[in-house]
Amino acid sequence: MERIFEYQISSAEEGRKLGDFLREKGYSRQLLRQLKETENGLLRNGQPTFMNIALKNGDRIRVRLLEKAEGSEAIMPAPLPFEIVYEDEDLLVINKPADMPIHPSFQNHGNTLADALTWHYQQQGKEFVYRCINRLDRDTTGLLIVARHQLSASILSDMVRKREIHREYLAIVEGIPPEKGTISAPIGRKEGSAILREVNFETGEPARTHFTRLETRNGLSLVSLKLETGRTHQIRVHMGYIGCPLIGDYLYYPDHTRINRQALHSYRLSFLHPITGKALSFTAPLPEDMERAFRS
């Protein structure tokens, strides 16, 4: 896989070291080291150059990202259902179905999003390296981002750390929470469990969740949620903490009379494109099983 980037140096950038210039563009140190080892990985005015060179006004910089898709024993390409909401040469936005893990693991082979996307590109004769940027639990549906190359992955991962990728979730909960609110309660691992989390004011890490009640029906509420932090199971733990657990949650509220998974959906993603800087915003409608659980 090859991706070419070209930059023209302005008068304001004159005198900068090339390495510093590229770091500001989002290139990680690992990626800069890789460029040094790539044939024609870095050219200045058509000639090989060095990271410590001082740039001049009008210089043309050409970056060649070259990557070979090496097969992973963990990935088993498979024709699984998923929806591509947006695609360009830098990233994908996926609408993930329920019962699909993000990554292969000890118990998950041939049923993951990594397997599905690898198969999808193999059918087109294209190389593909899987780089999922934001995580969703196996049974959480909705939107997530996959990077198409190392530079977009580097920039998007940095945006995640800086909370510059904005997400909105929809959940169906038992009971009727306040119309609006913020839950500020630390979350930590539950003693004796490797999986379960709980609110713990002594050992938990800070966690904040903002929620808005959108609609109520038959003792259930449809709730919009936005996170300030990204703790494991944060929405599931926080909503249970205020007495409004997600229906169908096999870990925290295992009542499957209405739905056989936690009723949680990644509804909206908004962020700046990592390469062009263009504002992007996507939504994915509430999936059929959540609609049916709430309306029936």
Image: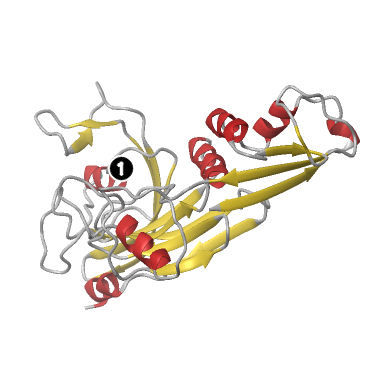
Percent from the top left, x then y, of residue 8?
82, 43
Secondary structure at numbered mark 1: helix
Q: Give the left or right position of residue 103, taking residue 190 as reference.
A: right
Which is nearer the eye, 176 or 110?
Answer: 110
Residue corresponding to mark 1: 234
Local crowd at mark 1 within 10 Å, few (<14), some, or many (≥20)? many
Q: Give the left or right position of residue 269, taking residue 22 as reference.
A: left
Above or below — where is 44 with respect to 220? above
Quarter of the C terminus within the rendering: bottom left
**Residue under the image location 51 percent in, 46 percent down:** 67
Which is nearer the eye, 129 or 107?
Answer: 129
**Residue under the image location 88 percent in, 31 percent down:** 56
**Residue under the image location 19 percent in, 61 percent down:** 261
Residue extending furthest toward the bottom: 296
Above or below — where is 270 with respect to 25? below
| Residue type beneath disc 1 | Gln
Q: Is residue 99 in view from this perspective?
A: yes
Task: Tell how many labels.
Answer: 1
